[in-house]
Image (tube, rainbow, N blue to C red):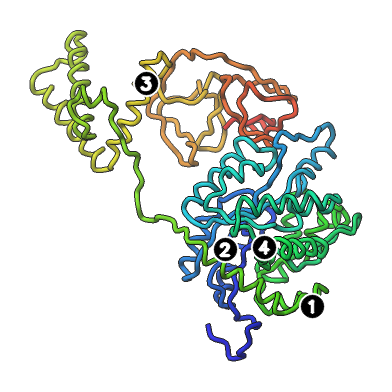
Amino acid sequence: MSCSCNSKRCKHTPMVHLHLHTEFSALDGAAKSSSYVKLAKEYNHPAITILDHGNMSGTLTHYNKCKEAGLQPILGMEAYLNDDIHDRPNIQTSADKEDAESVDNSRSNTHQSIIVKNREGFVNLNKLTYMSFTEGYYYKGRITTEWLFENKNGLIVTSSCAASKFSRLLEEGKEAEAEERIKMFKREFGDDFYAELQFNEYINKQSGYGQKKYNHFILKMIKKYDLQPILTGDVHYALPEDNKLQDILIAINQRKPVGDFENDKRYAFHLTTRQLNYANVADFHRLNKEMGFNYPEDFVDKCLENTLKVAAKCNFEFETGVDKYPKYEATPDVVDYFKSSDTKEIITKLAHAKLKQKLSIYRKNNIVKVTPEVEQQYKDRLDYELQVIDDKKMLDYFLVVWELIRFCKQNDIATGPGRGCFVPGSRVKMADGYFAPIETINMGDKVIDAFGAEQTVINTFEYDVDEDIVELEFDNGKIIKCTNNHEIYTLNRGWVKAEELTDVDEISEITDHNGKSNLSLD
């Protein structure tokens, strides 16, 4: 888009938003990627960075929307960082619970902006996300500084917003410690560590600490350690008037009317910072003056131009339209036995050998009358099925599974039918929306599967479970039986094995046929 004003500070001057939240920042981000894309096209912005809170769920959606519009999608995440992932507030009262579920969870949770440069960075950020939910989860997925440094390749990080660890140390009067942390990040990330500045109204009424003081510290670090500055908007919604929508989302998140927490210090940032919309270059220059930051215009220009340089470093592309399948590599004993390393030849020989074995059992036990014609029918059917598997490019997958089962049998590890942890009394959702004990379900009944689709039961199986069974008793009197390793979703710790549940874990409830509240294990 060309501009007739010939000014490098107009609304059409190129820049890139490097700190932007979508609706995947659950009950906090108040806009979809498509809304941001529309404004980026209007303002002549060549790229948009997604930086949702604690998850990467919106990355593919964001990527596709940007690509459709001819924009460069930049992926990332604003991680919850906590160097003591075992920190668990003592929840004894409802007020304690509200503190634990608050926007910042606990004072030890801070924000860390992470941006993907390339494919290695995408893999590493996915690894960090996985670790945050499997090892660091407590109401939110959390990572540690150590994990970040161990998986730093291909990633860009910034000094982040006023909720960062740098800022938290500064607010606590630990400026020397905050500076040491700046030096540590510079040492680890080099030129991929950027000093992030923001223009907003945030100020803590109790301590007097706010964005201006944090910016002042970052400016000193820029000069002292030759850091490259960037200017970002902590974007949570598309248009200025959408700030009220974000307030409502936060109110829903906290289960409070907006008026009930307008003066609550935990939510002061969200309710007093009104400029979290998608801005253009002219907006940033205006905010610089209106909010009293009053930085030199040339410096503001440099910060915004650096956002383009950051974008130029990022080149990750999803591989779309390409099917990915596992590759089977035969072990030496398999190659020696089958006299081949070719996947198709191995699985064909293996399948026909197994068929020969089964037919021998059929003959011996008179299960099926195996005539030469019947035997040929079995062979033809097997060849047909192998061809279907080959056409679907799944031969390698079948052999990988075979290797897993073979290893288990060789090492006396129990294997069995694919099943869950169902025991008598386990409830299954029926097609009519009600739940029924699994032992009452018959062939022909219609149930809802794990993907929400209606399925017809074509057979039922019963077998002994050689596992310990645990009984879970809940405060509503409900008792549920399941295997020890059955994972149950808790609100505070995510998925937890039944044997590891404690009396502080919270499990969502549903209603049965009689309107009574029962705990769901679905």
Q: Element at badge 3? A: helix
Residue tagged 3 = 407
* Amino acid marked by disc 4: Leu
Considering only order in the chain, which callout, 1 or 2, is on the residue closer to the N terminus? Answer: 2
Residue tagged 1 = 289
Q: Quadrant of residue 391?
A: top left
Residue tagged 4 = 227
Residue 483: x %, y % from top left: 56, 19
* Amino acid marked by disc 1: Lys
Q: Element at badge 2? A: helix
Residue 298: x %, y % from top left: 70, 79
Residue tagged 2 = 33
Q: Is the C terminus in the top left, top right, bottom left or bottom right quadrant?
A: top right
Viewer-closest of 157 and 161: 157
The circle drawn on residue 417 is none
For mark 2, does the 10 Å Cα neighbourhood hold few (<14), some (14 to 19), or many (20 or more) residues?
many
Considering only order in the chain, which callout, 3 or 1, is on the residue closer to the N terminus? Answer: 1
